[in-house]
């Protein structure tokens, strides 16, 4: 990626009101809202990490991880850059631990290549203890391994804040 510098600094704005939450925890941002659903309301909340870099004075997204707490784990999506080999998928690895089986790409959209993820409670516990979630993919043009690093700094606190908001 040459001289491109990745930045994954979340905004420091913190907003809490009756129906909305936005706060930073380490390298993660918690985004929650209450929305109308027919005659009732429902709360939705996700923890997000977005990494960007500057190219030709334009901010470009490198990747985005968006995770939602669910009973027994988290679900969400990864948005990765174009140019990855779809057939090989993405392999997740916490720190230098075992690599999980490949997860397939769902689709490519203008915002990037989408990978759906579901992480069970056991692996969420590993994420809480880890420092980095590595995403291994293959570059389509060179066939070489490309590794993206998602910081887990603040992951535990962000997930706890999202779970509390949803109660």
Image (tube, rainbow, N blue to C red):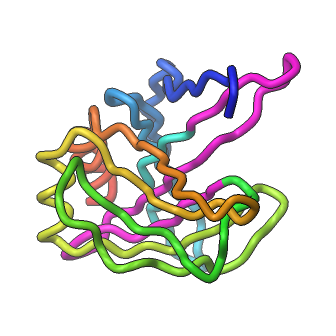
Q: Is residue 149 above or below residue 27?
A: below
Q: Position of residue 55 (x, y in %)?
A: 81, 25
On screen, residue 122 versus residue 145, left or right, reads left
User: Quadrant location of residue 16?
Assistant: top left
Q: Which residue appears at 71% of the width and 65% of the height?
A: 140
Which part of the image, by quadrant, shows the N terminus? top right
> Which residue is at the front of the view, 152 or 28?
152
Which part of the image, by quadrant, shows the C terminus? bottom left
Q: Which residue appears at 56% of the width and 40% of the height?
A: 50
Q: Is residue 25 above or below residue 32?
A: above
SS assignment for the magenta stretch, majority: strand
**Magenta segment: does it hold 56?**
yes
On screen, residue 130 versus residue 134, left or right, reads left
Q: Position of residue 66 (x, y in %)?
A: 49, 55
Q: Position of residue 143 (x, y in %)?
A: 63, 64
Q: Which residue appears at 14% of the width and 57% of the height?
A: 126
On screen, residue 160 versus residue 141, left or right, reads left
Please provide the residue range marked out in magenta.
Answer: 51-80
**Magenta segment: does it hold 74?**
yes
On screen, residue 139 versus residue 127, left or right, reads right
Q: Position of residue 146 (x, y in %)?
A: 54, 52
Q: Is residue 93 above or below residue 129?
A: below
Q: Which residue appears at 21% of the width and 53% of the height?
A: 127
> Which residue is at the front of the view, 66 or 3?
3
> Which residue is at the front of the view, 13 or 28?
28
The number of numbered discs placed on residues in the rendered structure image is 0
User: Quadrant location of residue 141?
Assistant: bottom right
């Amino acid at each position: 990626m040459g001289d491109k510098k990745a930045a994954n600094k979340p905004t420091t704005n913190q907003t809490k009101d009756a129906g909305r939450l936005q706060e930073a925890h380490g390298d993660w941002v918690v985004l929650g809202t209450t929305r109308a659903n027919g005659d009732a309301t429902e709360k939705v909340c996700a923890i997000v990490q977005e990494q960007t870099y500057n190219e030709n004075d334009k901010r470009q997204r490198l990747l985005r991880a968006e995770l939602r707490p669910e009973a027994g784990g988290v679900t969400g999506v990864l948005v990765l850059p174009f140019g990855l080999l779809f057939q090989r998928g993405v392999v997740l690895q916490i720190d230098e631990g075992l690599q999980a089986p490949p997860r397939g790409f769902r689709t490519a959209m203008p915002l990037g290549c989408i990978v759906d993820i579901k992480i069970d409670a056991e692996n969420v516990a590993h994420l809480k203890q880890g420092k980095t979630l590595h995403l291994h993919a293959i570059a389509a043009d060179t066939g070489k391994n490309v590794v993206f690093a998602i910081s887990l700094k603040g992951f535990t606190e962000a997930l706890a804040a999202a779970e509390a908001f949803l109660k």
